[in-house]
Amino acid sequence: MFKRHGLSVFAVVIAAFLSLPVIVIVSYLLKADGALWQHLFDTVLNDYLVNSLLLLLGVGTGVLLLGVPTAWLTSMCSFPGRRWLSWALLLPLAIPAYIIAYTYTGLLDFAGPVQTWIRDLTGLGYGDYWFFEIRSLGGAIVMMSLVLYPYVYLMARAAFLEQSVNSIEVGCSLGYSRWRAMWSLALPMARPAIIAGLSLALMETLADYGTVQYFGVSTFTTGIFRTFYGYGDMAAAAQLAASLLAFVILLVLLERYSRRRASYHSAAESRARADLIPLTGTKAAMAVIACSAPLIFGFIIPATQLLFWAVFEAEPLGWDFVTLAWNSFSLAFLAAIIAVTLAIILSYAKRTKPIKPVRTVIAMAGFGYALPGTIIAIGVLIPLAWADHSLIALFESLGWDSPGLLLSGSLVALLFAYTVRFLAVALGSVQSGLEKIKPSLDHAGRSMGHNPLTLLRKIHVPLMRSSILTALLIVFVDVLKELPATLILRPFNFNTMAVRAYELASDERLVDAAPASIMIVLVGLIPVLMLHASIARRRPH
Amino acid sequence: MIPMNLINTFILPAVAASLLTATTAQAGDIVNVYSARKEALIKPLLDEFSATTGIKVNLITGKADALLKRLQVEGSATPADLFITVDVGRLHRAKEAGVLKPVSLPSLEKRIPKALRDSESYWYGLTLRARPIIYAKNRVNPDELSTYEALADAKWKGRICLRSSQSVYNQSLVAATIDAIGAEATQDWMASMINNLAKAPSGGDTDQLKAVSAGVCDVTIANTYYLARLINSSKEAEQSVASQLAVFWPNQLGQGALGRGAHFNVSGAGFTKYGKHPKQAQILLEYLVSATAQAWYAEINNEYPVVAGVEVSEALKGFGVYKMDPIDLETLGENNRQAVQLMDRAGWR
């Protein structure tokens, strides 16, 4: 029995364990406080909903517009600068949304250099001229689109690159033009990947607190924190978070339903690349502009501003920055390995036995991504502290010294929280990589008497190498940027670069936060460059 | 990717080591602190404390409510001895949540005035933070200003900037106003004041000060240490912002609510119920109200000391002396929830 279902059972246990924090949060629904809900409903809930929906709509459109065309151009066409643009387009991923928001506010605010310069030049005063109000819903949409589009870009590009050339060639030989082939074949075939990237961007948007809070936009998430911090009502905050989750589940189900019968693996297993479509003249210039604009606005401008602040205006970092960088790096590294390993096991279990219990529990394990980090952290803290208390009771009954908070007070809690929060990221990438491998390979392997784990190691993992690397990269960078869960769960005397940047920024010392922010970006660049090197090695063109 | 041997030799052992050290915060001559006060604004003092007493301080900083939740969940196993916040509402919340224990210490009671500590000794105030009106010198005649309530007047239409209602400092200001003029009047006051805003609330106190200086609006309400920090800044742009601003102490004249005094809040600390190092925690708390520590707060972060006779910074002296609202600080905590509700109703985002 276990031999036949071992992998499924193992996967269900892991996934159930990872779903614990989400279940803890959802269970708060049982203790609803009618009066507070009535008040929220009467006053602010409507605003929260409308703003959150507009934000989702805006960021969704933004990341698709920035991510898909750039992915297509860099993977299918040739134009000057394509090679380095193809990896440089990932760079905005390294900038946390709240930091890009602070940075652009510093630049574009009424008191910032741009508007001051306009006023000095024209002699106009505030209100005499129109200028884009960065602290607004629109501003939040632009900021988040600029740093979240790489999710779509990465996934879409990986999909375009892994697409069997034959499908496109067949399309062309049937009389499709190259562009027609893109619309009718490549894009629909890349759909699972694009949707995976889009849903990551949207879940991140829903979970964001730093940006919307700074811009004074009331969204569902600011509502959750207002309820938690303002009313001191953790239960009601958790209930709001649970309703947020219900919304996410609805979206996920809708997406599933819309592609219920489609399969996305290609029958042919061609590794050959079609020639890139050469672009010249105006077309090449437009491609360069389209691909460099997201890079300039999403990375070069904010990074330059941060660097300027860090070098010329901020208090310099002390020597403890080495410790901070090491803490951030090692946590992100470990979390990425853990999350991606678990994601591979879970996805593969689902592939070998796509039965309902396995699918359901894996889907649940991925929902942590849509919840704000603070809420996840509390969902992690409660079961771990319970386990700690049980352990302490056990030790004391044996007459031993209390071990203290072994789990909830150590980095175990943080790693657990990161895995819960970012498993969806790893799952998204790994699953879309796995989906492209045709099942007949599995059948062939099984009929030759190999067990599933051998197949996974020998066949699937090598075939989806770039998807796995992508997953590692995203989780690494996400953990590097992660703040709220780190803030609550970290042990004594333990800080990361994100914590340092946040502490200074929330003390309204934005400029002094710049060195730590720049460090986050720099450490985040390491895996981006490694990923590039690794993919470039595989596809030397 | 990184070679496996590098991972095995360096990264894994290092991480394992930090996993282990993280759990050893319970033994020895130490004190463990959960602090909502930012590291930069407390660590130097704690280092000084360790150097003089030999007691090691372990610190976790974070948001008050999150730390409070952590204390609650950890229960009797919590390693924390001292809980420090920057707002009395959160101290009150901690007391209500049952994570603090009353500790009556003559050494502290002698130094901290009765109004600035809990009547049942659950918490002690450490510094004072005043939240007056700040105005643009070239566009506002101080005679135009009088009370917080008067900012509801139509003459301020389009001339006010305010931080959002998420700010605990605004919440405690509203909590105090409820006590002074009643809930209904408070809501009306806020609704009219919100109507006078030049722009939707966003950003922090410093952003409001910059907005006033840039001419977006003429007055705002902000904590004084933000203005003092701009005054003392080494950056010309920040000094120039500060040079255009002045402090107005509201509600100084008249009877009753009118002349109740300017709003202030305290940062403070309480002993945790299950702390394992009460003795060391006491020594630390006594240190934090010592003349040295109090002068440090006044000088470095421009907060007002709770202990009489401690010199304040030049910037604070420049703001003048003022009458404080003598409200019972516990009331601020008790009214906090209602304050947020009224802010929701009045449309203060």
Image (spheres, helix red, strand yellow):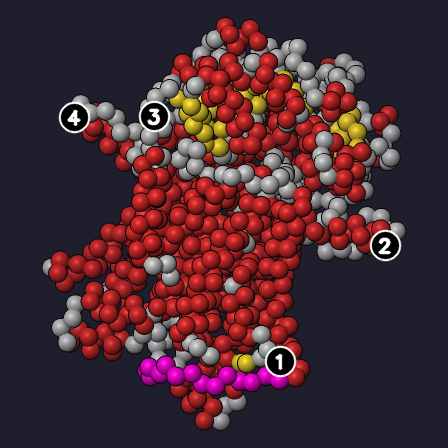
Name the residue tied to disc 3.
B26
- Host chain of mark 4: A
Name the residue tied to disc 4.
A398
Hey, what amino acid is under mark 3?
Answer: Gln
**C-alpha gap between disc 4 and disc 3:** 20 Å
**C-alpha gap between disc 2 and disc 4:** 78 Å
Hey, what amino acid is under mark 4?
Answer: Leu
Q: Regarding mark 4 in the picture, which secondary structure is present there? A: loop
Percent position (x, y) of residue A419? 36, 50
Which residue corresponds to the image point at 64% horizontal and 31% vertical from the top-left? B170
**Quadrant, the N terminus of chain A:** bottom left
Is residue A268 inside the magenta stretch?
A: yes
- Host chain of mark 1: A
Circle 1/circle 2 CB separation < 8 Å: no
Is residue A133 inside the magenta stretch?
A: no
Name the residue tied to disc 2.
A121
The span shown in magenta is A267-280
Which residue corresponds to the image point at 44% horizontal and 67% vertical from the top-left? A533
Name the residue tied to disc 1.
A284
Q: Nearer the viewer, mark 4 or mark 3?
A: 3
Q: Give the class, few, some or many, for how many residues have Cα within 10 Å of label 4's Cα (few <14, many ≥20).
A: few
Circle 2/circle 4 CB separation < 8 Å: no
Give the vertical position of A285 relative to A154 (above or below).
below
Identify the image quadrant of residue A234.
top left
